Amino acid sequence: MPLFNQRHHQALVQRQQQGLYRQLKCVEENPQWLNFASNDYLGLAQDPEIIAAWQLGLDKYGAGSGASPLVTGFQPPHADLEQQLTEWLGYQRALLFNSGFSANQAVLFTLLQAQDHLFQDKLNHASLIEAGMLSPAKMKRFAHNDVTALARQFATMNTDVDTASLVVTEGVFSMDGDCAPLALLRQITEQHQSWLMVDDAHGCGVLGEAGQGSCHLAGIKADILVVTFGKAFGIQGAAVLCSQETAEYLIQFARHYIYSTAMPPAQAVALRQACSLIQTQPWRREKLQALSGHLDHYLDNSIDLMPTITPIKPIIIGDSTQTMAIATQLQQRGIKVGAIRPPTVPPHSARLRITLTANHNETDIRQLAVAINEVVDVG
Ligand SMILES: *Cc1c(COP(=O)(O)O)cnc(C)c1O
């Protein structure tokens, strides 16, 4: 038997025994269901105006872009979207990618050289940690949101003239819903002539006055800002915001950009609509704050809900099997929440990941809270 067969079988059996087996389920839209597991924070994934924009885009530009951006894939809707993003977020340039995963990989692989130092928050997204491990640079992970730990790592860095350093953090952490100490990170990176890269997948659209995200809220500007369109934008794709020169550098050297088909132009049209709605409909962000208050109100005090200013509301359970059992019980009550286990989160910190969207109402939140009060055993 080829070794692959044996290896796969063993790994699957082991996963099962650890209570960590992941199952791909085909989710049918069920209107009876209360969904508290999506990242569609602003409720835009089913928005009629965005759907209409996408349809108009299809009529005008067809189904696909036909090529990578440097060939013929970069078309007027892509250029318009890039410009809209730069004006909104305050950067010289924006480059579009097909996913946040590929944007993160493109940036880290392209910027870093062997003599460089890369510092990442321990809880950064898998796409960032993996890119860091595969990059030629020396990567160090600092304790979550711990600027003192980062300072210690800076102190041990060699300071050769050809050593560049990059600090990477998420703006809002996807599994905890907490925010990075961006003002302090900006300060320390400036002290060390280092760059700061912020992946704001969960902050963009949700935080800041016009939804500009974590950096805007913290009053700082990152050297590289990554925003993704699969969360608050309700669609799919990503952009890297940076200076004119960095954009040109990425266009020359980032293989994920050069050798990948550009997103369909119709999708860029839809994203433009989403970007406009995010800026002109602050009620979606205000609603999230109100819903967050309702959740605090209706949950029993004994339930250990992590306090966050974001729509990500984790309840740490600890044990993976118990977390799955609770999620199943909630599902039997018509409520879908995320059950997140290692290795996505640190060992013994399996959790329910509840996410709110602007489409929920107070009754939905009460129903969720009543069910959680019933099924989460805090004894
Ligand atoms: C979802 C996510 C990504 C990946 O984005 P996709 O567009 O889904 O590939 C990257 N970083 C963070 C922090 C994310 O939450």
Image (spheres, rainbow, N blue to C red):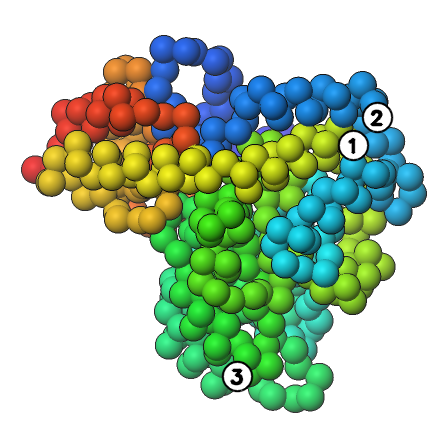
The image shows residue 106, relative to residue 243, as above or below, that is above
Element marked by disc 2: helix
Q: Closer to the camera, 239 or 253?
A: 239
Would you say 154 lies left or right of 321 here?
right
Q: In which quarter of the view is residue 271 placed?
A: top right
The image shows residue 243, relative to residue 74, as above or below, that is below
Element marked by disc 1: helix
Q: Which residue is mark 2?
A: 61
**Looking at the figure, which quarter contains the C terminus?**
top left
Q: CA distance from mark 1 to mark 2?
A: 6 Å
Q: Which residue is mark 3?
A: 191
Residue under the point 61% across and 38% down? 276
Inspect the image, locate mark 2, and give the three-letter code of the amino acid beneath it: Tyr
Q: Position of residue 367 (x, y in %)?
A: 23, 21
Cβ of mark 1 under 8 A from ligand 1: no
Residue under the point 49% across and 24% down? 24
Q: Closer to the camera, 223 or 54?
A: 54
Would you say 321 lies left or right of 311 here?
left
* Number of residues whose C-alpha sits closer than 10 Å to that of mark 1, classed few (under 14), some (14–19) or many (20 or more): many
Inspect the image, locate mark 3, and give the three-letter code of the amino acid beneath it: Gln
Q: Which residue is mark 1?
A: 265
Q: In which quarter of the view is residue 248 placed?
A: bottom right
Question: Mark 1–mark 2 contact, CB under 8 Å?
Answer: yes
Asked if one can make out residue 338 in the rendered structure from this viewpoint, the answer is: no
Inspect the image, locate mark 1, and give the three-letter code of the amino acid beneath it: Pro
Q: CA distance from mark 1 to mark 3?
A: 42 Å
Q: Position of residue 90 (x, y in %)?
A: 63, 59
**Looking at the figure, which quarter contains the N terminus?**
top right
* Number of residues whose C-alpha sits closer than 10 Å to that of mark 3, classed few (under 14), some (14–19) or many (20 or more): few
